Amino acid sequence: MPFLTEHRLVLDDLAAEVAAADRGAIVTFVGTVRDHHAGRAVRRLDYSAYPEMAESECEAIVAEARRRWPVAVALRHRVGQLEIGDAAVAIVVASAHRDVAFEACRFVIDEVKRRVPIWKKEYYADGSVAWVDPTAAGGTVPAKAPDA
Amino acid sequence: MPFLTEHRLVLDDLAAEVAAADRGAIVTFVGTVRDHHAGRAVRRLDYSAYPEMAESECEAIVAEARRRWPVAVALRHRVGQLEIGDAAVAIVVASAHRDVAFEACRFVIDEVKRRVPIWKKEYYADGSVAWVDPTAAGGTVPAKAPDA
Amino acid sequence: MPPAKSITVTVRFLARYAEVVGREAVSVTASAPATVESVLSQLGAVLPSAGALPPKPLCARNFRQVRGNEPLLDGDELALLPPMAGG
Amino acid sequence: MPPAKSITVTVRFLARYAEVVGREAVSVTASAPATVESVLSQLGAVLPSAGALPPKPLCARNFRQVRGNEPLLDGDELALLPPMAGG
């Protein structure tokens, strides 16, 4: 299960996976945990996944990117408890051409957001807790209290 | 003169310059020295600049990106002798939104290539030397021998 | 061997849905041939708290997203997924 | 004070152009009013090796790219730039 990890994401390690002497363009995307969401101050987040499906979706996304463009792709998504500023997702795309590297990197993050089963529970400064839900009004749905 | 440097580019250091708790999307571009150019095996490169103008152009590009999009931008370009695989240019763009981060990062690298006065001299495996010139047939113009 | 008259599938609740129903999975036996929809319609009888779930949640069969008319076979895992929020 | 009858500018050769002409800069005095083109046209007289340069190179005046009709003033730096190859 190489795409999900509970460990800190290190961009340089991912870049080393895809670096090659004939790939002169490297585009990366990192999504970090923000301190606000929908106007509320966030303290920390819990990321959870449907692990088997998340792994197979990540694998499929990387395979599709490699089918569509001449690229090498490294992808990791954190799960577990994250603090403000932590990298939640990191993507590194290497290619001989920058057009292709930008396109493929954009594709991978868009697909990750669209189809990888990962969810986040936000813990706010005021003590309340909510699940992030892009389809809900306000972007969140209240969660049970952390100790419930 | 903060944009040109003779030191190794470290992506994590650049990212630290633009990271902020309200910027959840970070897009980076790194251009590395390839081992081949126009079908010839490259051993190493010398990057030279018109330093005063290169600095002011880099500054103008970053300012323009910040005017057009809500982004923070870090940009560095190496000068001097580089080896295969070394990062020659590194750009880190941070924003609250990934669309904007991708667009701005793409803009910055395109403008750097278009208008920053930097040149490279390639040293080939066969001992010959040439200046890279995107407007020339074959992409290079022969240079004087390194010891001439 | 005649075709089975019923199948048993594991229904898995993810993230917020596990909170809503109060558990992470339940075993459901349904008459064959079964589909995602036919199993979902029997879920409330097995697990009353599942009545609080949306009527047509995102579903995955054996780790791949599927529509409501997807056939289910004995031993399948049917997962109910809240809207995704990764990245 | 009457207007100067001539100006002196520093013409700088970058990268490959420095190799071609065999030096990095030369001082050129030209009659005023002067432009990039008028100074370039006098360059061959001051520095014969400059004849090997392209007739209309990319030029920068005081570190900003300019066209051939750009006026030049006394003390300006006019740089001749090969096609850029950074990034």
Image: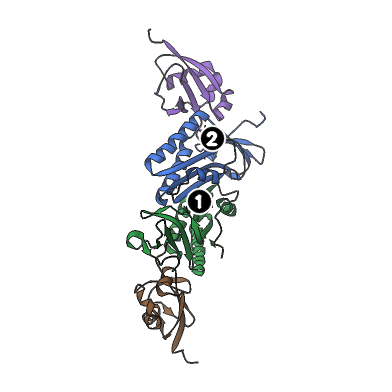
Chain colours: A green, B blue, C brown, D purple
Graded by Cα atoms within 10 Å as few (under 14), some (14 to 19) or many (20 or more), the crowding at tag 1 reads many
Residue D5, image x and y in percent?
41, 10
Count of labels shown? 2
Of residue B39 and residue A147, the one placed in the foreground of this image is A147
**Is C4 placed above or below B111 here?**
below
Q: Residues within 10 Å of mark 2 (few under 14, many from 20)?
A: many
**Residue sitting at 59 percent across and 40 percent down?**
B8
Instruction: Tell me: residue C54, above or below residue B38.
Output: below
Which dot marks residue B137?
none
> Is the same chain shared between marks 2 and 1?
no
Image coordinates for residue D24, horizontal then vertical, percent: 56, 23
Residue farthest left in this picture: A137
Q: Residue at x 40, y 72 (%)?
A: C20
> The disc labelled 1 sits on which kind of residue?
Thr
Q: Residue furthest top?
A: D1
**Of all residues shown, which one is farthest toward the bottom?**
C1
Whether residue B64 is visible here, answered yes or no, is yes
How far apart in space, not on screen, are marks 2 and 1 (Cα)? 22 Å
* Residue at x-position 56% and y-position 63%: A2
Q: Say which residue appears at 43% left-offset and 12% top-offset.
A: D6
Type of residue at label 2? Answer: Leu
Dot 1: chain letter: A
Name the residue beneath numbered marker 2: B4
What residue would you read off at disc 1? A28
Is residue A69 among the parts visible in the rendering? no
| Image vertical order of residue C28 relative to residue D42, above or below | below
Residue A145 percent across, percent down from the top left: 42, 66
Q: Quadrant of the N terminus of chain D?
A: top left
In what element is the residue under mark 2? strand
Picture quadrant of residue B146 = top right
Q: Are marks 2 and 1 in contact (CB under 8 Å)?
A: no
